[in-house]
Image (cartoon, helix red, strand yellow):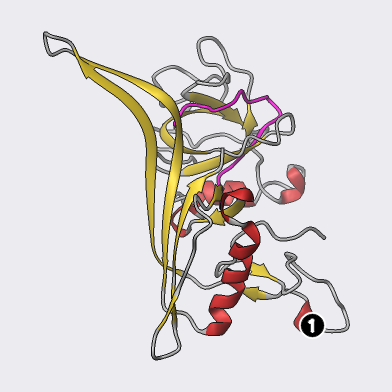
Amino acid sequence: MALSTRLPDPAYRRHFTGKTTHVNSGNAALLYGDYGPGFASVKVTSDQKVMMSRTNSQRLLAKAVAGQKWKIDIDYHPMTQLEFRPVDAFLQMKQGALTPFEVALPQYTTPSNTAWVANLTSSPAGTNGGNGYIFTAQTPATPYHHAAGSTNLLIGSTGWAANEGNTPTNIPLPGEMFTITDPNDSNHAKAYMITTVETHNVHISNPGAANKIRLGISPPLSKAVSTAAAINFINPLFKVVMPTATRGYSLNTDNLYKFSLKLEEYL
């Protein structure tokens, strides 16, 4: 079993061997490992470099000059030694920016619409074994395409349909995040925010069949997306690095560890 690549958190265990789990039927204590501590606060910043200038007539000219990345600042509650050391050891293994890892942010773990979550986690027995509808990128019609730079993504799932009416409840909502698992490009690890949602009933430009929805996204796609790509709406993981190898903590008189973490999206 591979070494864990996700920062330990209250929903994710890491075994002392460094693996995600350690199967040992003779000793239940070795089966799962320990959960990580929760966050006291999380700050997420969208870092988009834009070049701006004005003409002599004061007309504003602006142009994106680089790709976008997410910056994440995490503050922890004061931790005991047992809580702190597994996190410290995990991060020490990453050696700053040399090794990327994944982090789950609690505000993006579960989508807001409960009916949408139900569709993602439960489906008829004949669809994905009853484990939820799988949404994949669909073949789009011009001008909506899945090339790098696109700000729209057409997705769908066989057997699924958005609720009828002007306010469907089984769809994702603007402000939620997702990632893409593309079997044709394992390096596409970017996290995207949903900006708009269009269904076959409520739309500016009809996405087509009832089982399809069009997502407006930001930032634009960093890479082309194949029609085999699956879209991850539940617990999307940010792939990150520590921008510096310099890292420290403080220990107070109550023997509690104070620690914060600065991360940048890995592209």
Between residue 86 and residue 36, name the one nearer to us: 86
Kindly identify the amino acid type of the residue bearing the numbered disc 1.
Ala
Verify whether residue 236 appears in magenta.
Answer: yes
> Which residues are drawn in magenta?
218-238
**Is 185 situated above or below 144?**
below
Q: x and y percent of residue 215 in the render?
A: 48, 30
At x 59% / y 26%, what residue is drawn?
223
Going by the picture, which residue comes out furthest to the bottom?
254
Q: x and y percent of residue 29 in the render?
A: 76, 83
Q: Main secondary structure of the magenta part?
A: loop
At x 65% / y 76%, what residue is drawn?
34
Between residue 26 and residue 207, name the one nearer to us: 26
Q: Is residue 127 left or right of residue 170?
A: right
Between residue 248 and residue 155, name the one nearer to us: 248
Verify whether residue 242 appears in magenta.
Answer: no
At x 43% / y 47%, what residue is drawn?
71
At x 86% / y 76%, what residue is drawn?
24
Q: Is residue 211 visible?
A: no
Q: x and y percent of residue 124 in the render?
A: 70, 46
Q: What residue is pinned by disc 1? A: 28
**Is 78 situated above or below 191?**
below
**Is 41 situated above or below 98?**
below
Query: What secondary structure is found at the residue carrying circle 1?
Result: helix
**Is 82 situated above or below 111?**
below
Quarter residue 186 falls in:
top right
Quarter residue 161 falls in:
top right
Q: x and y percent of residue 119 in the render?
A: 59, 46
Q: Quadrant of the N terminus?
A: bottom right
Q: Is residue 162 left or right of residue 112?
A: right
Going by the picture, which residue comes out furthest to the right?
26
Q: Quadrant of the C terminus?
A: top right
